[in-house]
Amino acid sequence: MRIARFSYGDPESPAFAFGAVDGADGVEQLTVIDGHPFGGITLTDVRVPLAGVRILPPVLPSKVIAIGKNYAEHAREMGGEPPAEPVLFLKPSTSVIGPGATIAYPSLSQRVDYEGELAVVIGRLCRDVPEERASEVILGYTCANDVTARDLQKTDGQWARAKGFDTFCPLGPWIVTDADVSDVAIRTEVNGELRQDDRTSSLLQSVEALVSFASKVMTLLPGDVLLTGTPAGVGPLVVGDEVSVSIEGIGTLTNTVVTR
């Protein structure tokens, strides 16, 4: 199932809902979900055309937990070797935007990079999750762009500012609940030019291992997002660029870059 979060109706007083997406490209529709998708999904009789709504970030997470250097070639392109265990950092919830929203290039940085990633959406309250039971706490998967002020990442020594600007965590376009993400293609394009091209089978730490590891550090809440790391090929964005992250079986997340 594909689950989108969207707004529709009067632009001055829109309705907000989750919906199940069905149909083929161009004629897709949303069936509105009663309430939210956590703890069981109940579909209503309300259906709206996908083309007639605004797609929002698929969740509003309490936190975004991200993993650094989880592809070997990316670790090496950043000047180091793959870490022995996952490297965790956080992105604030205020960095989250949806598909079609703009990435705001901050005046404090002279080098802003894209980082296409597979994102995991947590479906239930959990902690200390055994790796073999990680699938029980996952609602589904979506595309992410871990936008990074690379120059500030280097000068600050820690990553909160470089990773935490408003708009620096595009997510979407929806959550896919039944995807097998063990070996799917992940690609990033900038203005139609392929910049990243790898498969999730190249992850150093699996999705299940990452969920288990993070849950032993902090309690995970429904709607929290775990970014699993970016492949090699990261690079700079400039104002006016259009950046797209595509993951096989999930979809494509596209955003443009504007001046903040």
Image (cartoon, helix red, strand yellow):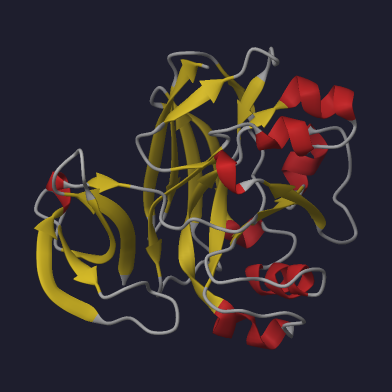
Q: Is residue 144 left or right of residue 165?
A: left
Residue visible at 33% across and 81% down in the picture: 41
In this view of the protein, can residue 116 be seen by the observer? no
Would you say 256 lies left or right of 218 here? left
Compare residues 42 and 170 and report the one nearer the observer: 42
Q: How many marks?
A: 0
Between 214 and 118, the one lying in front of the other is: 214
- Residue 70 in the image, given as x and y percentages of width and height: 74, 53
* Res 75 quadrant in image: top right
| Residue 34 in sight here | yes
Q: Quadrant of residue 79?
A: top right
At x 69%, y 12%, the residue is 110
Left or right, 171 with respect to 48, comes to right
Residue at horizontal 85%, vertical 26%? 154
Q: Is residue 167 above or below residue 105?
A: below
Identify the image quadrant of residue 231: top right
| Quadrant in which the N terminus is drawn | bottom left
- Across and down, in percent, residue 155 comes to 87, 22
Is 42 situated above or below 200?
Answer: below
Left or right: 74 as drawn, with respect to 119: right
Q: Position of residue 212 (x, y in %)?
A: 73, 75
The residue positioned 39% from the left and 36% from the top of the image is: 254
Query: Residue 144 versus residue 249: which sits nearer the camera?
Result: 144
Relative vertical location of residue 191 with respect to residue 225 in this rendering, above or below: above
97 to 60, vertically: above or below: above
How far from the left and from the top, in percent, is residue 53? 19, 47
Point out the residue furthest to the front here: 13
